[in-house]
Image (cartoon, grey):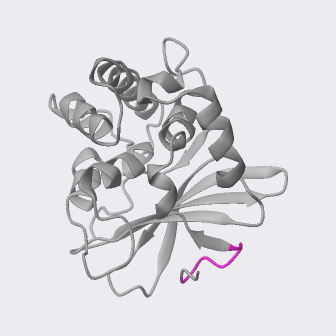
């Protein structure tokens, strides 16, 4: 698998992993690993358990295979999420891709902490809700939204943000009663994180 502008590792399509039990716990709970959430997150928020998480971790963090999750957009930039599985230096990279596939721009990473520019709420929604059916990658809008969620670097999200997140979480299998808890804590972490970065600027500004 090749992504222009990103050829540092053995990339493989990761979209098939999205439906495996343990994926969303691995992916989203990492955002709360820096102490930003007011209580310890648990896989049960997503209808999963520790065994699910452990089993899928071995696949997601395999140094021989770096899963890449493509989020192509019909109009404007799309995104790619890559598990950067360097031996002893694991992390997640976020790239923006141009509609013609001519360039992939690295905009953010998560190692122990998040670093990079991120997206506003409206930019995130714009990409999530504009799938390109002609391109390979994730087409389901709820899944696209959740894959892009760690990029949210916006201190002011609309009042509808929590309901949108709950809907997306239940769409991928989270129980209704715990989806609201997960949404509350994830949004609290993301908006709190945003206020600690006064130099924030969107990579799409002025594009």
Magenta portion: prevailing SS class: loop
In the figure, residue 45 lies in which quadrant? top left
In the figure, residue 82 lies in which quadrant? bottom right
Q: Position of residue 84 (x, y in %)?
A: 67, 59
Above or below: residue 204 compared with residue 123: below
Q: Residue at x 34, y 71 (%)?
A: 72
Q: Residue at x 48, y 23 (%)?
A: 44
- Residue at the far top: name it: 39
What residue range appears in magenta?
A: 4-10
Q: Residue at x 29, y 52 (%)?
A: 124
- Residue at the far right: name it: 88
Task: Examine the rendering and report whether any part of residue 179 can be seen.
Answer: yes
The front one of 50 and 160 is 50
In the figure, residue 6 lies in which quadrant? bottom right
Q: Position of residue 78 (x, y in %)?
A: 35, 69
Q: Is residue 6 magenta?
A: yes
Above or below: residue 112 compared with residue 120: above
Q: Residue at x 48, y 40 (%)?
A: 24
Q: In the picture provided, is 76 more to the left or to the right than 38? A: left
Image quadrant in which the C terminus is located? bottom left
């Amino acid at each position: 698998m090749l992504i222009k502008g990103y050829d540092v590792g053995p990339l493989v399509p990761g979209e098939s992993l999205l439906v495996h039990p343990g994926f969303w716990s691995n992916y989203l709970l990492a955002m709360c690993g820096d102490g930003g959430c007011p209580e310890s997150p648990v896989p049960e928020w997503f209808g999963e358990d520790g065994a699910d998480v452990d089993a899928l971790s071995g696949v997601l963090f395999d140094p021989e295979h770096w899963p890449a999750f493509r989020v192509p957009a019909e109009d404007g930039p799309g995104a790619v999420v890559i598990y950067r599985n360097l031996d002893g230096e694991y992390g997640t990279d976020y790239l923006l891709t141009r509609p013609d596939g001519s360039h992939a721009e690295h905009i953010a990473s998560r190692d122990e902490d998040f670093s990079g520019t991120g997206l506003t709420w409206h930019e995130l929604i714009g990409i999530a809700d504009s799938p390109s059916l002609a391109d390979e990658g994730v087409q389901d809008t709820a899944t696209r939204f959740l894959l892009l969620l760690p990029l949210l670097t916006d201190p002011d999200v609309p009042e509808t943000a929590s309901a949108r997140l709950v809907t997306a979480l239940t769409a991928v299998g989270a129980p209704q009663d715990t989806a609201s808890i997960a949404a509350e804590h994830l949004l609290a972490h993301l908006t709190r994180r945003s206020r600690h970065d006064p130099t924030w600027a969107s990579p799409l500004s002025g594009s």
